[in-house]
């Protein structure tokens, strides 16, 4: 029976995480290790400067107090699974999309990235929606994808960023393999005053948008398709190596 290690960045109490766990149970043993709070935007940080604690919520379901998604995969693999590699790592389902440059901030994607770093095929799942999430429908899509991945695997160094339209299972048009798109929105810094009149700052997106170029992640979900973008750990920009050769001596 395959072992599936699951995390997220929205916290262990998230409905998206629970729907994913429940849908994957028919495929194998599902072990959930998730942060104790919402860490959306935490990226790929690993906690080196503080100790961590784990709390058992129920069988095969743990919360890491103060842990990031990367910490959770680490502890799940090294402690809970006793260094026995899971067959696959899944992260999500995130409450909101992870498209284009979102990937670089995403704790959801970083959970999958950490899975790939420990040498396991990994996939991040995010919901393309803002509210009224149909997690049970989206979890069926996740199950379909994980089922195929357990059978066929992934190339070395590859992990997947999956975005699922917030639609009924029957309404989803299909699955497209895509490339990372480009963002068309900017964060704004909002300024407030605390009770003592001192300034506070809050970084938030004013409105969301991505460039809808054909073949991109955003284009797929906008058109009712599941978007699967293959990512790799090697961040080298091979196309640029000759362009900057002049720096060598
Ligand atoms: Mn999140």
Image (tube, rainbow, N blue to C red):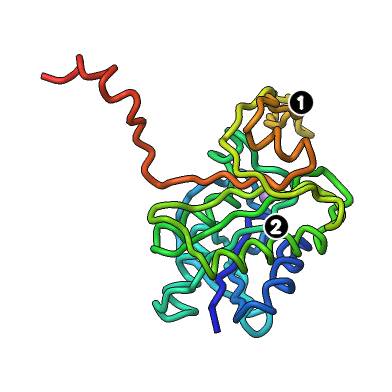
- Residue where numbered disc 1 is placed: 206
User: Quick check: can you spot residue 199?
Assistant: no
The count of marks equals: 2
Residue at image position (51%, 65%) is 152
Q: x, y percentage for residue 50?
A: 45, 60
Instruction: Determine crowd level at label 1: few under 14, some 14-19, many 20+ residues with C-alpha closer than 10 A.
Output: few
Q: Residue furthest left?
A: 249
Q: x, y percentage for residue 243?
A: 29, 17
Q: Is residue 212 above or below residue 9?
A: above
Q: Quadrant of residue 170?
A: bottom right
Q: Is residue 174 left or right of residue 98?
A: right
User: Quick check: can you spot residue 26?
Assistant: yes
First reached walking from the N terminus: tag 1 or tag 2: 2
Q: Secondary structure at mark 1?
A: loop
Instruction: Determine crowd level at label 2: few under 14, some 14-19, many 20+ residues with C-alpha closer than 10 A.
Output: many
Residue at image position (28%, 25%) is 241
From the image, which quarter does the C terminus lie in? top left
Residue at image position (65%, 64%) is 36
Residue at image position (59%, 76%) is 31
- Residue where numbered disc 2 is placed: 93
Question: What is the spatial separation of the Cα atoms under label 1 and label 2, in whole angstroms?
Answer: 24 Å
Q: Quadrant of residue 247?
A: top left
Q: Secondary structure at mark 2?
A: strand
| Front-lying residue, 107 or 89 | 89
Q: Is residue 233 left or right of residue 95?
A: left
Q: Is residue 234 left or right of residue 43?
A: left
From the image, which quarter does the N terminus lie in? bottom right
């Amino acid at each position: 029976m395959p072992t599936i290690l699951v995390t997220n960045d929205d916290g262990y109490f998230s409905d998206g995480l629970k729907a994913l766990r429940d849908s994957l149970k028919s495929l194998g043993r599902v072990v959930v290790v998730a942060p104790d709070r919402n860490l959306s935007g935490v990226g790929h940080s690993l906690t080196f400067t503080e100790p961590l604690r784990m709390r058992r919520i129920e069988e095969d379901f743990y919360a890491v107090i103060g842990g990031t998604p990367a910490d959770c995969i680490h502890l799940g693999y090294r402690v809970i699974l006793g260094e026995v590699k899971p067959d696959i790592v899944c992260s999500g389902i995130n409450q909101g999309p992870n498209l284009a440059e979102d990937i670089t901030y995403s704790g959801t994607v970083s959970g999958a990235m950490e899975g790939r770093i420990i040498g396991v095929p990994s996939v991040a799942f995010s919901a393309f929606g803002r509210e009224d999430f149909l997690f049970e429908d989206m979890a069926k899509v996740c199950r379909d994808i994980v089922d195929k991945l357990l059978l066929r695997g992934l190339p070395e160094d590859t992990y997947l960023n999956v975005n699922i339209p917030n639609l009924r299972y029957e309404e989803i048009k299909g699955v497209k393999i895509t490339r990372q798109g480009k963002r068309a929105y900017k964060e704004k810094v909002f300024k407030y005053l605390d009770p003592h009149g001192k300034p506070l700052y809050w970084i938030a997106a004013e409105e969301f948008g991505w460039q809808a170029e054909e073949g991109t992640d955003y284009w797929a979900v906008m058109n009712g398709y599941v978007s699967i973008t293959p990512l790799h750990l090697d961040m080298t920009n091979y196309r640029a190596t000759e362009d900057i050769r002049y720096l060598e001596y």
